[in-house]
């Protein structure tokens, strides 16, 4: 599994891989070895344990951002209530998305 999401270059409305990024991805494939935050050789047992789910983040953890490496602190606060109260009460870590918002709205 190779998580090359951070290798994508974004300019204007275009996303693409540079030759350097493509080379890095190919080398990781050819090495066929774990590289923390970038590549992982998953065993069949790991795939079975994840019920056959091949979602890359299950196998390759995200790279630690530079801000976190430098010890930046993050503050999480509750979201303000939106008209109709849909977002009210949601905090970081709460289930989010259309389904969670719909369930919250239905329970009010």
Image (cartoon, rainbow, N blue to C red):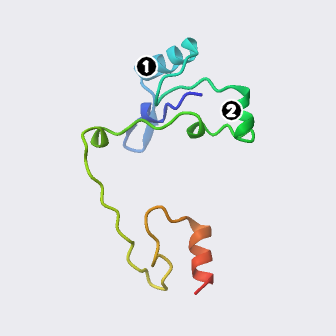
Look at 43% across and 35% down and name the residue there.
Answer: 6
Q: Position of residue 42 (x, y in %)?
A: 64, 27
- Left or right of 83 in this view: 75: left
Image point 67% across, 37% down: which residue? 54
Which of the two residues, 13 or 64, is positioned nearer the viewer here? 64
Mark 1–mark 2 distance (CA, rounded to whole Å): 32 Å
32 displayed left or right of 92: right
Q: For this view, does 52 lie left or right of residue 42?
A: right
Q: What residue does disc 2 label? A: 46
| Near-viewer residue (83 or 71) | 71
Percent coordinates x, y for residue 91 in the rendering: 43, 68
- For disc 2, the neighbor class at 10 Å (few under 14, some 14 to 19, many from 20) is some
Q: Circle 1 sits on which residue? A: 19
Task: Locate residue 63: give its quadrant.
Answer: top left
Q: Residue 28: percent from the left, percent from the top? A: 52, 18
Of the numbered discs in the image, which one, if any, rests on residue 38? none
């Amino acid at each position: 599994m190779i998580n090359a999401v951070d290798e994508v270059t974004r300019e204007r409305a275009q996303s693409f891989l540079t030759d350097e990024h493509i080379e890095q991805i190919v080398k990781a494939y050819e090495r066929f070895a774990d590289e923390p935050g970038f590549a992982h050789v998953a065993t069949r047992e790991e795939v079975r344990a994840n019920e056959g789910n091949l979602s890359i983040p299950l196998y390759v953890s995200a790279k630690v951002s530079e801000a976190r490496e430098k010890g930046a602190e993050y503050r999480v606060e509750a979201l303000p209530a939106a008209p109709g109260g849909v977002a009210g009460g949601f905090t970081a870590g709460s289930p989010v998305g259309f389904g969670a918002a719909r369930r919250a709205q239905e329970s009010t």
